[in-house]
Image (cartoon, helix red, strand yellow):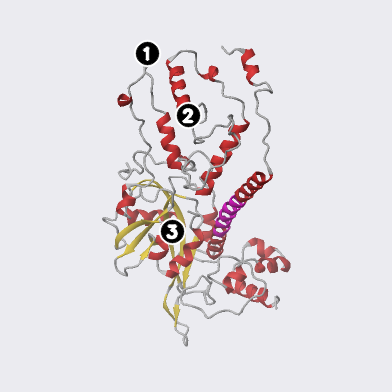
Amino acid sequence: MINLLRHFAILSPQRIPAPLRMARNRYLRHWTIHRAWLLFRRQQREAREKTWMRQYQSMNRACEELRLTSGPGTREEGYLFRMAMEKKGVYGLKGVPIEYARAQTETPARTPWDHEWKRD
Amino acid sequence: MMSAAPGRGAAALLRGSQRVCLQCTRSSTPLLLLRTTTPTTTSLLHPRRTFAAEAVPSPIPEQPTTTSQPPPPPSPGPGPSPYHIKSALILTRPPLLTRLPTPFESSFYLYQKRLNERLVAPFRKDYYFKQDTAHDLEWRIKIKERHGVPAKDIGRYNPRGRMAWNDEVLVGSTASSPSTLTEVLLKDAEVRVSEDGELIAPEEIVPVEKPMPRRTEADDKDDKTRLDRKLDETLYLVVKHGRTGKWGFPMEQVTTEEALHHTAKRALQEAAGVNMNAWIVGRVPVAHRVVAPEVEPETKKLVRRGDKIFYLKGRIMAGQADLSGNTQGLTEFRWLTQREMKKVLPEEVWESVKGMVELR
């Protein structure tokens, strides 16, 4: 059982620290660190977006080539493109395997990879 | 100058495709012009460029034998198609680990943690530990060792004392490095007081099990056939063709009954066996490569058919490749990161697939 009086005593303004106060040089250092952090975030974000654009362009060019391709065999032009654009079975419960939902961690599992996996 | 390029593009489009899609045939001329100013035109001019921005179109360079350009003479009439259509699978293992934080990131986090400690309300011990229980005794021992500071991961610093202003870490300090933090947290997690409330002797303290190292045995041995190497990067499956001695991806020719993803699945099974929990991401090709057909210059007769290779992307979630009994004449396989893959692959293959590689 929490003692309510003590609870509010701890959260009283006298126990909460005052806002930070920094001298000029210290504040300049703080500001520099802050700007460096923003720059770092920006570089990360731009590298990520660049990758996405590059991948999109690659897919786009491949699809354009596919659209202008006739075949295989006697199939008419654009047959493979239409097959590739089909969304059958993409949405729904079986659309994405559940193993795909594994999150990245900081350190690996005891057995990092199951090499002995067999298809039954 | 700009008027020449769309005209050429439109001509190529009409020549390459006798049957334009329904939308294009229905639409009037402006739409057709709009279509031709899209990246198709620029990719015609610069087959190897991965971006499409260009202010002034430059003259068409001399055609190499291998190019992504749709070549001029695909005769849609009777006769064999000048191309083999092939589907290849780029099987990738996603990174299992997060990126290691840069030194700047770790020190920034420590800095922010210390600033936060200067601003928060005091820790309420009574809320978490009942008076005079074993946990309370243990807390008292540990907080004394931390010089009265509840936070475990901010190094030797007291945010409430007289030196609270001195929250900056000096150059060369290891207080913010991930390995130091792991050590400190593991040490703190050790049980110091028994359930009866008695102090455990230092030699009887059970050390907490450490997390596995990020660098595995396969990394130390540099075994490139293992999947538990380079855990924080994407790995790509490349196979070596015994006949040509070149590295590439599992590939097969598309039959009339198949779509690209069927062929890619078959190619993987024929190359590397079925004992892989693999999944093909979508049905859309992520990269392509066109090898131009050989044509006799005078008679325009087809000497050798070219290749149109479409690469699909796959993900592996368990299992291992096994080349025994493959029907494609493969001798070796490797799981490589993108940098290693760049060194191993033939240049023209790398140029065509480099657009799909991941950031790390």
Circle 1 sits on which residue? Answer: B196
Pinpoint the chain carrying mark 2: B
Amino acid bearing label 3:
Gln
Which secondary structure, mark 2?
A: loop
Query: Quick one: quadrant of the N terminus of chain B?
Result: bottom right
Q: Nearer the viewer, residue A51 or B291?
A: A51
Pick whichever of labels 1 and 2 is earlier in the sequence.
Answer: 2
Q: Nearer the viewer, residue B332 or B89?
A: B332
Name which quarter of the figure residue B325 lies in.
bottom left
CA distance for labels 3 and 1: 56 Å
* Percent coordinates x, y for residue B49 in the rendering: 55, 68
Q: Nearer the viewer, residue B44 or B213?
A: B213
Circle 3 sits on which residue? Answer: B338
Question: Which residue of the protein is positioned furthest toward the front in this rendering?
Answer: B162
Query: In screen coordinates, is A74 left or right of B196?
Result: right
Mark 1 or mark 2, which is nearer to you? 2
Amino acid bearing label 2:
Arg
CA distance for labels 3 and 2: 45 Å
Q: Is residue B235 visible?
A: yes
Name which quarter of the figure residue B241 lies in.
bottom left
Above/below status of A21 relative to A79 = above
Label 3–label 1 contact, CB within 8 A: no
* Neighbours of disc 1 within 10 Å: few (<14), some (14-19), many (20+): few
Circle 2 sits on which residue? Answer: B146
Query: From which residue to which does the magenta span run?
Result: A39-54
Pinpoint the chain carrying mark 1: B
